Image (cartoon, rainbow, N blue to C red):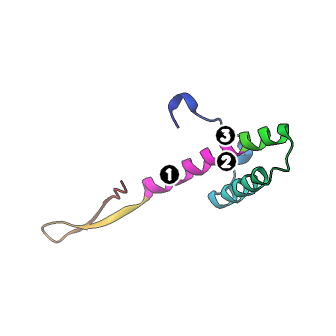
Amino acid sequence: MSKSEQVTIPKDIQKLSFEEALAELEGIVGKLESGAAKLEESIDFYARGTQLKAHCQNKLKDAQSKVEKLVVSASGDLGTEPLDVE
């Protein structure tokens, strides 16, 4: 998502845990895939899903920044450094 496409995340979504947001997002995907929703409902579901996706991405990014790996220096000292997942 580029900076020009930033999504405003409502407060009710901000309060959700990653797992809660993901479960709601999965429910929305199921509703959209079923084709049973009317057009206006589908648009609302899509907008909510976009917000939930952004929230989940933010939660994952925050968690990733907190993960560290243990390292042993040349002298044998233990320490930590950020985990490079890329």
Q: Amino acid at mark 2?
A: Leu
From the image, state whether disc 2 or disc 3 is nearer to you. 2
* Picture residue at 51% right of the left edge, 31% below the top: 3
Near mark 3 (Cα within 10 A), the count class, few <14, some 14-19 or many ≥20, is some
* Picture residue at 58% right of the left edge, 33% below the top: 6
Residue beneath label 3, please? Answer: 9
Most common SS among magenta residues: helix
Q: Amino acid at mark 3?
A: Ile
Labels 1 and 3: the sequence-earlier one: 3
Q: Which residues are magenta?
A: 49-66
Alpha carbons under labels 1 and 3: distance apart: 16 Å
Q: How many marks?
A: 3
Residue beneath label 1, please? Answer: 62
Q: Secondary structure at mark 3?
A: loop
Residue beneath label 2, please? Answer: 52
Near mark 2 (Cα within 10 A), the count class, few <14, some 14-19 or many ≥20, is many
Q: Is residue 23 above or below residue 61?
A: below
